[in-house]
Image (tube, rainbow, N blue to C red):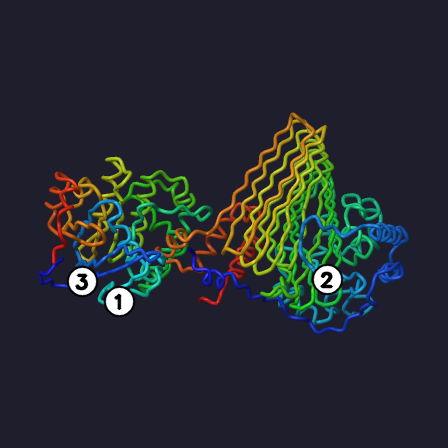
């Protein structure tokens, strides 16, 4: 948790968040504040609640917030629909991007981009203008134009799916991007492409939350803060050296931590 | 679990064509007997061979039983409680569109099918059928220049009697099935198309069928003949007002393709489907069949079925000519208490014949949506191939989807492939689209359109847009 004084207002504030699915508590008091320009890494064992936290911030309907608040640009968003959150600038990069048969990737990206542009009072793009824009963004993730004419994520390799996520992030220009294990299943080259894409998209106004198991993504993108999650709580927060230590000592090292207050 | 109520809202259907045109009609008495058939034939000033055709069909029909193998649930139809001929009162002879009752023109205007010279659709010729009669056919002179005959079947009986006598009932014999026999006995109007040898029809042809009267059935008959090396694309649209009674629609469509000819027949069927409790709606019992008589001839059916309380319909191809091709592309959407039992029959008779079946069924609400199809390879169909793909999509947890593929092969040297799948719109897919800023309703509609893409790609341009809109409309709810 950050207590330092910041010059600007936070983008995202998660305050003492408790959440459950099917009456099973998953998050047990998570607090996290992200300021513009910051990169937060969240690490932890499988099942510690990392992915749940990301889905709840994006508004997944399967989870109930039982206590606490999520604020985005100072506004409480607990009751907003997922599409409203996306339109206002929250982006979730999926760990397992979903296949949508029959819906062309190009059309999907265009409708999605226009929904965000409409919210920003920007002119919506027709197919031609959008193709221009998307070509430019394809460069960032070194994707071939052929991806655009295929169905959304259908038949994509693991690496292609992840790059497609970063392409969406590039098009939507979110204020905060939560990337859920974007590095998993990527080979070294694909990891570099994805990492460089993320770096090019982010800037001093955006916040990023990287959910990851591995140091190797953090070698490419240096986090401002590293949080360790266990059993639905953030149990330790530190700088980028915390990730290195974790890499060396393993999660067993964290087993004896008590939640820092 | 998907939020069921939200899904229900989204698939709620506003029916925009439910109005009734207040017009004076000429109706004959209810009931069905030989005298009624003679009366219909007399009103249409038919030659004797046609009256005989009707009477023979009626005799056969009387000996037949209503089919129940589809397991459709509906109240017994009282065939004596139906009016078999209903026509808007018009002047005896109409020489131009200006003499057509403005109320009728207005009706078709409202349906998006303007008929008058100033407003008519520019890229497609239309035959507009209102209850039992054809009101008007556009672009007749232009088509005549190419030798194309496009008119109501009643007119064809008068002016092209040789063709009618030669072909009527040769694809769907009167004894084919219960509803075909009924249609053969009492058919009133419909469209007739003749494309001469070597002619590619210069524009799409289209018929628009409108049921207006609540107590009369519609029994249209369509006959399309494509001579050697000719081709035509034909479109058909249907709507009806909202009545709380059921109206019977039993049509017969016959297509004949000679050597190297091709016929593409597309339907967007949006008859009134009844209300949420299943009250009212059209009983749509239709026999559609094409005969690929010539070598390398091709008949392609594409249909988007969204309306009717009950749909019972199997557009089929008889592949006689060597290397002839049959295709069937279908989207059937059912909601509330609708029942659809639709599919095709591909009968491979000649050698090296080919058929493709792509069927997409979407069931929402408490509806039942079944694909029923037959692929048959006859003894002489050596080197023939069939590919079938039947996909079902379920929306909500009360709807049902069935697939009944029948395969019969008497020819070892032939290939039959069948693929089938069932899917449900998953919460994860919806969340994925929503988390990209796409609203729930649009997300559902995008996925449904995506599911139907293979079929929409087969529809003529204007129709594909209309079909997409129609599905979106059907999926439009109280949200947004």
Q: CA distance from mark 3 to mark 1?
A: 13 Å
Q: Residue B259, percent across and down?
A: 72, 36
Q: Residue B231, percent across and down?
A: 67, 43
Horizontal side of A85 relative to A36 (left or right) equals: right
- Same chain for mark 2 and mark 3? The answer is no
* Quadrant in the picture for the C terminus of chain A: bottom left
Return the disc, 3 or 1, that comes first in the chain's sequence: 3
Disc nearest the viewer among 3 and 1 = 1
Residue B136 got which mark?
2
What is the chain letter for disc 1?
A
| Residue B434 figure quarter | bottom left
Disc nearest the viewer among 2 and 1 = 1
Question: Foreground residue, B106 or B174?
Answer: B174
* Quadrant in the picture for the N terminus of chain A: bottom left
What is the chain letter for disc 3?
A
Residue B232 got which mark?
none
Label 1, residues with CA under 10 Å away: few <14, some 14-19, many ≥20: some
Residue to which mark 1 is pinned: A76
Question: Secondary structure beneath disc 2?
Answer: strand
Residue to which mark 3 is pinned: A10
Asked if the residues shown at circle 3 and circle 1 are in contact, with their CB atoms under 8 angstroms apart, the answer is no
At 71% from the left and 61% from the top, the residue drawn is B75
Q: Residue B158, percent across and down?
A: 84, 55
Label 2, residues with CA under 10 Å away: few <14, some 14-19, many ≥20: many
What is the chain letter for disc 2?
B
Question: Which residue is at the far left?
Answer: A4
Q: CA distance from mark 2 to mark 3?
A: 69 Å
């Amino acid at each position: 948790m950050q207590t330092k004084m910041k010059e600007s207002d936070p983008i995202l504030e998660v305050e003492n968040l408790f959440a459950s699915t099917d009456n099973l508590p998953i998050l047990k008091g998570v607090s996290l504040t992200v300021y513009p320009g910051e990169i937060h890494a969240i690490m932890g064992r499988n099942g510690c609640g990392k992915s749940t936290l990301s889905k709840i911030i994006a508004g997944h309907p399967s989870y109930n917030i039982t206590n606490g608040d999520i604020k985005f640009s100072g506004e409480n968003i607990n009751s907003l629909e997922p599409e409203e959150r996306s339109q206002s600038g929250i982006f979730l990069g999926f760990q397992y991007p979903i296949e949508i048969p029959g819906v062309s990737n190009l059309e999907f990206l265009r409708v999605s981009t226009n929904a965000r542009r409409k919210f920003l009072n920007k002119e919506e793009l027709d197919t031609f203008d959008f193709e221009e824009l998307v070509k430019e963004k394809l460069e960032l993730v070194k994707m071939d134009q052929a991806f655009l004419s295929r169905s959304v994520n259908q038949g994509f390799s693991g690496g292609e799916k992840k790059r497609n996520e970063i392409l969406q992030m590039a098009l939507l220009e979110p204020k905060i991007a939560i990337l859920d294990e974007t590095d998993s299943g990527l080979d070294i080259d694909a990891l570099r492409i994805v990492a460089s894409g993320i770096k090019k998209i982010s800037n001093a106004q955006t916040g990023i939350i990287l959910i990851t198991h591995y140091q190797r993504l953090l070698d490419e993108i240096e986090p401002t803060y590293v949080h360790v999650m266990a059993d639905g709580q953030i149990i330790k927060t530190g700088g980028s050296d915390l990730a290195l230590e974790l890499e060396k000592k393993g999660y067993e090292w964290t087993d004896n931590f008590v939640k820092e207050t | 679990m998907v939020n069921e109520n939200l899904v229900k809202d989204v698939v709620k259907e506003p029916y925009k064509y439910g109005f009734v045109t207040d017009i004076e009609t000429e109706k004959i008495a209810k009931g069905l007997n030989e005298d009624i058939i003679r009366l219909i034939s007399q009103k249409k000033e038919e030659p004797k061979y046609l009256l005989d055709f009707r009477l023979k069909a009626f005799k056969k029909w009387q000996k037949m039983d209503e089919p129940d193998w589809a397991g459709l649930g509906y109240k017994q139809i009282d065939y004596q409680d139906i009016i078999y001929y209903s026509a808007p009162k018009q002047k005896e002879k109409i020489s131009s569109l200006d003499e057509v009752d403005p109320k009728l023109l207005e009706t078709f205007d409202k349906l998006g099918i303007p008929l008058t010279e100033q407003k008519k659709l520019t890229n497609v010729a239309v035959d507009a059928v209102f209850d039992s009669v054809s009101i008007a056919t556009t672009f007749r002179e232009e088509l005549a220049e190419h030798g194309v005959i496009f008119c109501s079947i009643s007119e064809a009986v008068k002016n092209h009697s040789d063709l009618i006598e030669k072909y009527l009932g040769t694809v769907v014999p009167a004894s084919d099935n219960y509803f075909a026999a009924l249609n053969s006995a009492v058919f009133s109007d419909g469209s007739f198309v003749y494309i001469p040898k070597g002619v590619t029809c210069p524009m799409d042809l289209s018929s628009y069928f409108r049921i207006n009267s609540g107590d009369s059935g519609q029994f249209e008959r369509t006959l399309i003949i494509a001579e050697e090396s000719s081709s035509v694309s034909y479109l058909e649209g249907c709507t009806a007002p909202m009545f709380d009674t059921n109206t019977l629609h039993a049509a017969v469509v016959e297509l004949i393709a000679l050597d190297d000819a091709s016929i593409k027949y597309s339907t967007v069927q949006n008859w009134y489907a009844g209300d949420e409790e299943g009250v009212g709606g059209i009983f749509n019992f239709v026999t559609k069949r094409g005969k690929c008589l010539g070598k390398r001839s091709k008949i392609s059916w594409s249909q988007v079925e969204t309306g009717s309380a009950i749909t019972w319909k199997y557009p089929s191809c008889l592949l006689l000519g060597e290397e002839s091709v049959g295709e069937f592309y279908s989207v059937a959407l059912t909601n509330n208490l609708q029942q659809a039992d639709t599919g095709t029959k591909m009968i491979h008779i000649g050698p090296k014949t080919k058929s493709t079946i792509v069927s997409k069924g979407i069931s929402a609400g408490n509806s039942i949506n079944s694909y029923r199809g037959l692929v048959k390879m006859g003894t002489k169909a050596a080197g023939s191939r069939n590919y079938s793909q039947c996909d079902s999509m379920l929306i909500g947890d009360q709807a049902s989807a069935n697939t009944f593929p029948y395969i019969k092969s008497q020819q070892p040297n032939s290939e039959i492939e069948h693929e089938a799948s069932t899917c449900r719109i998953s919460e994860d897919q919806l969340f994925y689209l929503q988390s990209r800023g796409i609203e729930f309703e649009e997300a559902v509609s995008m996925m449904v359109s995506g599911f139907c893409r293979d079929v929409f790609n087969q529809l003529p341009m204007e129709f594909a847009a209309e079909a997409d809109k129609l599905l979106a409309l059907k999926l439009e709810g109280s949200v947004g």
